[in-house]
Image (cartoon, rainbow, N blue to C red):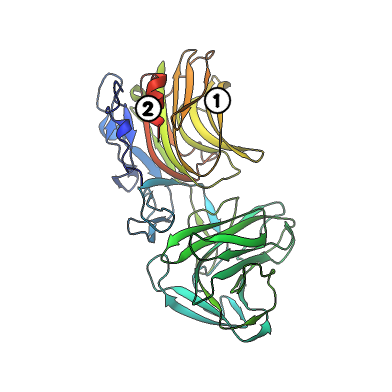
Amino acid sequence: MAACSSDSLQSSISNMPTPSLILVPARFKTGKLYTPVATTSGGVVLGASGDFNVTRATTATRVNASGLIESVASGIPRLDYFASGGVVGCPALLVEPSAQNIMAQSETLSVSGNWTQINVLVTGSAIASPDGLASGTLIVATSGNLEHKISRGTATTVASGAVVTTSCFLKAHGTNNFAQLVIGGFGFSPTSPFANFNLTSSGSVTAGNYTSAFIQNYGNGWYRCGFTVTAAASGTPSCFIVPIIASGTTRDGVFAGNGNGVYAWGFQVETGSVATSYIPTTTGSVTRNADVINVTGAVSGCIGQTEGTIYAEVDYRNFSTDTQVIIQSITDTQNRIAIQIFRSGANNVLQAFAVVSNSQVVSITYTIPSAGIYKVAFAYKLNDYQLHVNGVDRGADTSAGVPAMNTIQLGNFASVAQFNDRIRAAALYTTRLTNAQLAALTTL
């Protein structure tokens, strides 16, 4: 595992200037995320005015330092320790847009009045769930060549054309290693959507009909499994959990129950192309508000006004179709320098750009090949812009001015373009770092 603090943000690299602002997520309180360094270009310490403001008017979940899912109060920044396989990783700032789990009773899967039980034996509180409580539900197929499942309709409808992502935490039971998730009730694209999952080793998606599907190892045998489709009509989705016994089992099919089963917990249905952090529900839909994180006040002096460099290290896993701002220095929508990610066709593209007087004067792009850690530095100066990603020069622009800026936004832009993942570090420099320094700063 990489070191959890970025030594490269300090002056350990030969001839590297000290940043004017550093964020390595560690210390916080309600409404604040503390920065260890916040100074002006003249060395004036900004103190509390250099700390990040955190606004989120609802509770939200994270993976804590023990590897368990837990809820944190409104206004608390989410330091998330998730690492695949259930191994606790480096704390990273989890920043997400607003999302709503429209599946009620997301954890009471064993209650027949909440979920319909069809040819299965269901036992609640059967095993420790990903939150560390004994709230995992066991679903076992009864004997007979029949359908075997639990099912429930969502609490609200979805509109025609909406992208819908279904997810659930699943764990193998006994010698059975497979499970199936199904969404239906009306038309979807692709038609008759479902996905089968192998709940062993690193986990895998073995069959199905979907736009995309995923499986994430949360440790202790638990996997978060899910898939994405598009509603072809307006309606109320119905969702099934099926304890299948073979990797290629057909959608909601008939099979002979032999005591095969699966543990399940935390069902979620939401609009959007990725599964956001888990949102627990009881009697109805629950909304988690967006994470809005910024620095305002006496900070313009720590933003290079004629030259500078902005830096971010991100753990990018969620290939969303939405535009996602990682970090930007901004005066308003008409003047800003930013690093963001957006979808172009089948590709996820990292873009560094500058807007001066409402005109985009710089755009340098880099296609992201896969999920992983990305260290990005965008240096700017009059007629001298440069982008480095993971130690490599990704492009330059030599014909643009520099906007005036007085605010720093992390992971969001006016609650419209929200990041949807984890930010491990961020920094500002009030000088245009050299290309050699950019390469050193961003090398993994």
Residue at the farthest bottom position: 143
The residue depicted at 42 percent of the width and 69 percent of the height is 129
| Front tag of 2 and 1 | 2
The residue depicted at 35 percent of the width and 45 percent of the height is 31
**Image vertical order of residue 135 relative to residue 310, above or below:** below
Label 2 – label 1 distance at C-alpha: 20 Å
Look at label 1 and name its amino acid: Ile
Q: Residues within 10 Å of mark 2 (few under 14, many from 20)?
A: some
Residue 293 in the image, given as x and y percentages of width and height: 41, 40
Quarter containing the C terminus: top left
Residue 288 in the image, given as x and y percentages of width and height: 49, 54
Residue 208 in the image, given as x and y percentages of width and height: 67, 61
Quadrant of the rendered image containing residue 3? top left
The residue that label 2 is drawn on is 440
Inspect this view and state whether residue 305 appears: no
Which mark is first along the chain, 1 or 2?
1
Task: Return the residue nearer the eye: 128 or 325.
Answer: 128
Inspect this view and state whether residue 353 appears: yes
Determine whether, in the image, residue 24 is placed left or right of residue 185: left
Q: Secondary structure at mark 1?
A: strand
**Image vertical order of residue 87 relative to residue 370, above or below:** below
The residue that label 1 is drawn on is 364
Quadrant of the rendered image containing residue 270? bottom right
Residue 432 in the image, given as x and y percentages of width and height: 40, 19
Q: Residues within 10 Å of mark 1 (few under 14, many from 20)?
A: some
